[in-house]
């Protein structure tokens, strides 16, 4: 068995006021997902447009853990869609290789999993929590756990094709406060042989607003014997300890907080190992990290697409630094890495990382939504019929663009 080692309840968005500074010796165990033993018990969330190979490798250099790919559709992968295949790509030194997949057809999922396993994937995660309207109104994403028998059918197809490769699922609390689905999802995950389940402590209606409900994570942990990962409001390393202490969950999933802060995984590794984390980097070091990240994106996606991808990262990396607002405006329109360097040269490299930027939402907009479901979808929650999936290249492209928004 190979280990990864390298150098309450409903919390507010304000910094923690009390908690032991770091993990006590023996307080937490490695996250066990089938044959994988992950230390520290920390996972990079599979975020669309974010968790590609360049960013995963950058995060892994700062600290160990489990680093998931962004979500890849089963139909796109099976049809050998160029972008689907690229986003599923890995590097020889990436271990464990972890891919998140999405699909609503058992045949597609089963065949995709077989191909991924044959290609050497070490872990497969299934997304049943996407709240994007264009997905849920067709019965996909977070709409699937509404029908436990359908969820079971899809998970069974993946697990039976995965062999010894562990399969986990990610879900939200439910559709809204009147339709909570995570208890059924946990039961199905355990019965169908999932190696673990991740719960984002918000409903699909809440999107990313308000505070994540850590009580729900603790409740799920009390109901199942498989590992439970908690997701929601892990802004600083201390938040991970607070979540695990208050819920009893087996690991944490880090999403928006690491955007423009890949060194957060180094802070998490330190705090779980009982050490004080290093202070955040000054702007000069942030710029060096940005340069490495930008060059990796260009190498991976090509010059034009790589620079385009880097625009949003420039905004996230510089968020909160004094005088950076004007620079972000210019960086959002940059057409080359030379332009990026010229704009960043206008800033004071000795600026300290702004403490107020640690808990700032860098990506998802706030607000809530009314979740769209197919007409009559709730009339028969025992139905296990898969929703209609895209078949033509045009339908597939539109579907994947919709998923990319979530």
Image (cartoon, rainbow, N blue to C red):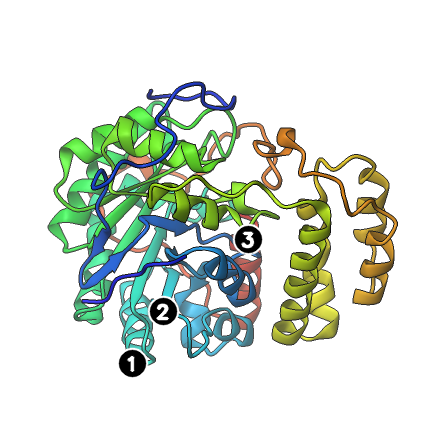
Can residue 203 be seen here? The reply is: no
Q: Is residue 344 above or below residue 57?
A: above
Q: Nearer the viewer, residue 61 or 101?
A: 61
Task: Locate residue 336, reporting x and y percent.
Answer: 81, 66
Q: Is residue 286 above or below residue 336?
A: above
Q: Nearer the viewer, residue 392 or 318?
A: 318
Q: Nearer the viewer, residue 187 or 264?
A: 264
Q: Left or right: where does residue 276 sit relative to residue 86?
A: left
Q: Is residue 406 above or below residue 38?
A: above
Q: Left or right: where does residue 92 sit relative to residue 257?
A: left
Quadrant location, the N terminus: bottom left
Query: For residue 402, which numbered disc appears in the image?
Result: 3
- Tell me where residue 325 sits by quadrant: top right
Can residue 316 be seen here? The reply is: yes
The residue located at (33%, 57%) in the rendering is 125
Q: Is residue 159 above or below residue 111?
A: above
Task: Locate residue 246, reporting x and y percent.
Answer: 28, 26
For label 1, the SS is: helix
Q: Left or right: where does residue 53 sit relative to residue 159?
A: right
């Amino acid at each position: 068995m190979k280990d990864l080692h390298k150098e309450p309840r409903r919390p507010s968005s304000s910094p923690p006021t009390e908690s032991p500074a770091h993990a006590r010796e023996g307080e937490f165990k490695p996250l066990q997902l089938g044959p994988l033993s992950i230390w520290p018990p920390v996972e990079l969330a599979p975020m669309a447009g974010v968790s590609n190979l360049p960013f995963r490798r950058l995060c892994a250099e700062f600290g160990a853990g489990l680093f998931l790919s962004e979500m890849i559709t089963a139909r796109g992968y099976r049809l050998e869609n160029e972008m689907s295949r690229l986003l599923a790509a890995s590097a020889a030194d990436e271990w464990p290789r972890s891919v998140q997949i999405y699909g609503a057809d058992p045949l597609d999922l089963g065949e995709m999993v077989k191909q991924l396993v044959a290609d050497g994937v070490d872990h497969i995660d299934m997304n049943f929590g996407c709240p994007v309207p264009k997905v849920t109104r067709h019965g996909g994403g977070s709409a699937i756990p509404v029908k436990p028998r359908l969820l079971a059918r899809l998970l069974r197809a993946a697990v039976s094709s995965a062999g010894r490769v562990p399969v986990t699922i990610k879900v939200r609390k439910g559709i809204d406060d009147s339709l909570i689905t995570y208890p059924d999802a946990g039961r199905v995950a355990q019965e169908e042989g999932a190696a673990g389940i991740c719960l984002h402590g918000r409903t699909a209606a809440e999107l990313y607003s308000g505070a994540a409900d850590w009580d729900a994570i603790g409740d799920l942990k009390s109901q199942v014997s498989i590992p439970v990962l908690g997701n929601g409001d892990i802004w600083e390393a201390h938040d991970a300890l607070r979540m695990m202490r208050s819920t009893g969950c087996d690991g944490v999933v880090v999403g928006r907080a690491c955007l423009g802060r890949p060194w957060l995984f180094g802070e998490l590794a330190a705090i779980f190992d009982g050490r004080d984390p290093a202070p955040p980097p000054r702007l000069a070091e942030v710029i060096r990290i940005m340069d490495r990240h930008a060059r990796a994106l260009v190498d991976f996606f090509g010059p034009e697409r790589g620079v385009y991808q880097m625009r949003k990262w420039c905004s996230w990396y510089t968020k909160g630094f004094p005088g950076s607002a004007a620079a972000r405006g210019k960086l959002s329109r940059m057409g080359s890495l030379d332009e990026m360097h010229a704009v960043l040269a206008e800033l004071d490299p000795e600026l300290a990382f702004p403490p107020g930027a640690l808990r700032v939402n860098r990506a998802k907009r706030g607000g809530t939504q009314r979740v769209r479901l197919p007409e009559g979808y709730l009339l028969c929650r025992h139905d296990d019929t898969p929703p209609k999936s895209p078949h033509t290249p045009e339908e597939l492209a539109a579907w994947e663009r919709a998923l990319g928004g979530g």
